[in-house]
Image (cartoon, helix red, strand yellow):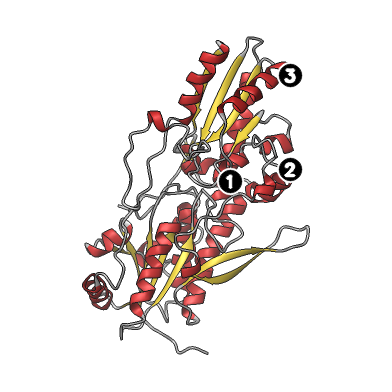
Amino acid sequence: MNSILRGAAVVGQSGGPTAAINASLAGVIETCILHSDVIPKVYGMRNGIEGFLEERLVELNPLFTKKDGFPDTDGLLKRLVHTPASALGSCRKKLPKPADDPGFYENLVALFKKYDIRYFFYIGGNDSMDTVAKLTEYLRTSDYEMRVMGVPKTIDNDLMGTDHTPGFGSAAKYIAAEMQEIVRDCAVYTVKAVTIVEIMGRDAGWLTASAALPNLVSGAGPDYVYLPEVPFDMEAFFGDIARAFERHPNVVVAISEGARFADGRYVGEGTQSGAVDVFGHKYLEGTAKTLELAVKERFGCKVRSIELNLPQRCASHLASATDLSESHLCGENAVSAAIDGLSGKMIAMERAEDSAYRIRYVTKDVTQIANAVRTVPREWIVPENNNVTDECLGWILPLIRGEAEGEWKDGLPVHFVLE
């Protein structure tokens, strides 16, 4: 049994938001309040580690604790669960390697000491786990005892070490629902037309794969889906469109924003700005528009391109109840693991191998997760590179099940807003 470490906790959110990231935050806050004998204060970092360095902190206990000392699970915590985007704000800050800038970490630890922070919880994806890994590495050389935990999140579902990531299920549910609605809308006309839907996903095509879920459930899905895991071939694409026209006049396809040709060029490269973020990631856009122009030139038919864009990650009104529940449990388990003495870990989900969908929560060494990308298995992509298998869709389907029951007022969802 590890010795009890008493002190405050700080929690932050980093990277792109999701419809479930605040459910994980609620899980962290609620569990900290339940263990107030060990963690008497919970601070929130405004805008992640960037805000913490500027001491932009907010004490969360007064907001989410009832008069009897228990967490307000039926009030603001519940509202927080159903709020999209990052309630604490976010950032994309790349930390230096501890060996390159030890002074940076000395200043960071000085702030931890100032606020008596002994627990650090960071909710995010690959780049956020990089922050957790670097902080863990430095603390091994420090005499200040802390416990650092990563809480996974990303709609891209590209984190290693976990069956899937919180946030993906809700994004997949939104995409699948939108694709079904788009297909229904396009089917009302007899005039030849092609609709190309661009979906988020730089290196991993999990979100694009989810666009095909209606094919499994209702039969009203896209004709083809194109993932970044396999090279995109323009002539093969034209052949796919021609074959779809033989079946019906209205063709609908989904393609990842990260689709690339065999030589590595992005399909939408000609319409992109070339700008990159602090982690070196290119800002992607224009894939669907590029294909719209190409199809128009080749077939001369009506063509439209649609970018689902930000709604993929902020449509909390259509969040998956399964996703929200699992996201909350990831936050809960992160706090419990830290109190039990673990550090330098990320909470991960493991799926039961039998036919029933069941998840258990485990911890993984964050150094095995940071800066790696988990892609759709090749065997789940059809040989023609233009769709995914039913096995793939069957794997995704449990993650989108269940409808979230949030709070509504005058026809609109009610959100938690941190003043």
| Residue beneath disc 3 | 247
Q: Residues within 10 Å of mark 1 (few under 14, many from 20)?
A: many
Residue at 57% over, 37% down: 175
Q: Quadrant of residue 3?
A: bottom left
Q: Secondary structure at mark 1?
A: helix
Foreground residue among 268 and 304: 268
> Is residue 119 visible in this depiction of the protein?
no
Question: Sequence order check: which comes first, mark 2 or mark 3?
Answer: 3
Looking at numbered disc 2 in the image, what kind of residue is underneath it? Asp
Foreground residue among 77 and 265: 265
Looking at numbered disc 3 in the image, what kind of residue is underneath it? Arg
Q: Secondary structure at mark 3?
A: helix
When the figure is inspected, residue 333 is found, relative to residue 152, above or below; the finding is below
Q: Position of residue 353 (x, y in %)?
A: 74, 63
Q: Secondary structure at mark 2?
A: helix
CA–CA distance in space, label 2 to label 3? 21 Å
Left or right? Give the position of 220 relative to 143: right
> Is residue 344 visible in this depiction of the protein?
yes
Residue at 46% over, 42% down: 314
Question: Sequence order check: which comes first, mark 2 or mark 1?
Answer: 1
Q: Position of residue 179 (x, y in %)?
A: 60, 31
Q: Quadrant of residue 232?
A: top right
| Residue beneath disc 1 | 206
Looking at numbered disc 1 in the image, what kind of residue is underneath it? Trp
Q: Which mark is residue 70?
A: none
| Residue beneath disc 2 | 390
Residue at 58% over, 46% down: 206
